[in-house]
Image (tube, rainbow, N blue to C red):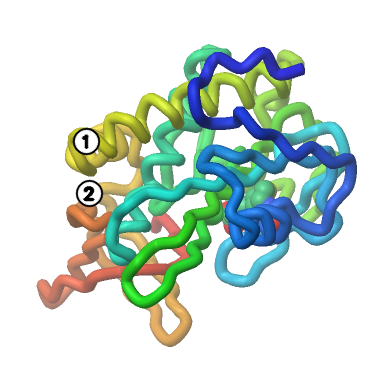
Amino acid sequence: QLGLETKKLGKMIHYQESVESTQKIAHQLANEGVQEGTLVVAEEQVSGKGRLMRSWHSPKFSGIWMSLILRPKIPLHEAPQLTLLAAVAVVQAIEDITDLQPQIKWPNDILINRKKVTGILTEMQAESDRIHSVIIGIGMNINQQIEDFPEDLQEKASSLFIESGETVSRSKVIQRVLVRLENLYDLYLQEGFMPIKGLWESYAISLGQVIKASTVNDTIVGKALGITDAGVLLLEDKKGTVHSIYSADIEIQ
Ligand code: BTN
């Protein structure tokens, strides 16, 4: 029982003990035409998906693995804005429940003390420039201990339990994430991306710093100037050339 306080988000919940990936189920449901705000939650994902074709470690009972279906009437090129919106919602939800101070690493990794506690994967279904649905996948490390992570992740990943020293109720976190998401989504539909952009920037970790962005074809080192109104990262290299980064892996130098 989640005890939801939202009007639209999470009113329909598909809960399953073990799935391949909640993203996959959400895509199927979106195709079947389910209502906006439908949520897929699982206790465990056996092949969780991360950004840039990576896998996402999603062990049983210790984290939140969920995918939310939205159907905004916005042009396709504005969809990345929703990724940034989701990151802000997660930060606010963590702040509601703990004394921790999460930060966002572009586009949407949530870090606490520089370690990643949440990843967000946004995928879309669209026909020409019309969005059919946006699937926001959120993976939150909640009650894992450090030895629960695979060895190669132990240096850079963490959980709310590790950072706060307290067990955190997963249903409470889901509840707060949905409330925050709903408020921000309403704001976004009424006033556009500007207020969300301001919030995102206030939590961003890498702005003004020199970062390394690895894209599929290229590596660019430069100063992170900020994000555009579409949510694209702007990097200025040594020569003063400004690059627009749509999708990349970011390392803070
Ligand atoms: C990242 O690479 O940082 C994004 C990770 C996103 C993981 C979540 S968990 C719920 C949803 N289902 C998936 O298979 N992936 C996303």
Q: Nearer the viewer, residue 201 or 78?
A: 78
Q: Tag 2: Cα neighbours inside 10 Å, few (<14), some, or many (≥20)?
A: few
Q: Quadrant of the C terminus?
A: bottom left
Most distant residue in the left direction: 240
| Mark closer to the observer (2, 1) | 1
Horizontal and vertical percent for residue 3? 67, 13
Q: Nearer the viewer, residue 76 or 138?
A: 76
- Residue sitting at x 34%, y 40%: 204
Amino acid type, label 1: Gly
198 horizontally vs 144: left or right:
left
The picture places residue 235, in percent across and down from the top left corner, at: 23, 65
Task: Answer with left or right where residue 86 lies relative to residue 222.
Answer: right
Residue 94 visible in the snapshot: no
Q: Position of residue 72 (x, y in %)?
A: 37, 49
Q: State left or right for residue 111 relative to residue 15.
A: left
Q: Is mark 2 within 8 Å of ligand 1?
A: no
Q: What is the quadrant of residue 49 in the picture?
A: bottom right
Please tell me which residue lies in front, 115 or 134: 134
Which amino acid, by three-letter code, is at mark 2?
A: Gly
Residue at image point 36% right, 57% down: 80
Tag 1 residue:
198
Marker disc for residue 208: 2
Q: Is residue 246 above or below residue 12?
A: below
Image coordinates for residue 229, horizontal then vertical, percent: 18, 53
Taking the spot 21% from the left edge, 52% from the top edge, the residue there is 226
Residue at (60, 48) in percent of width and height: 34
- Outermost residue on the bottom side: it is 217
Mark 1: few/some/many CA within 10 Å (<14, 14-19, 20+): few
**First of labels 2, 1 by sequence position:** 1
- For the N terminus, the quadrant is top right
Q: Is residue 45 in view?
A: yes
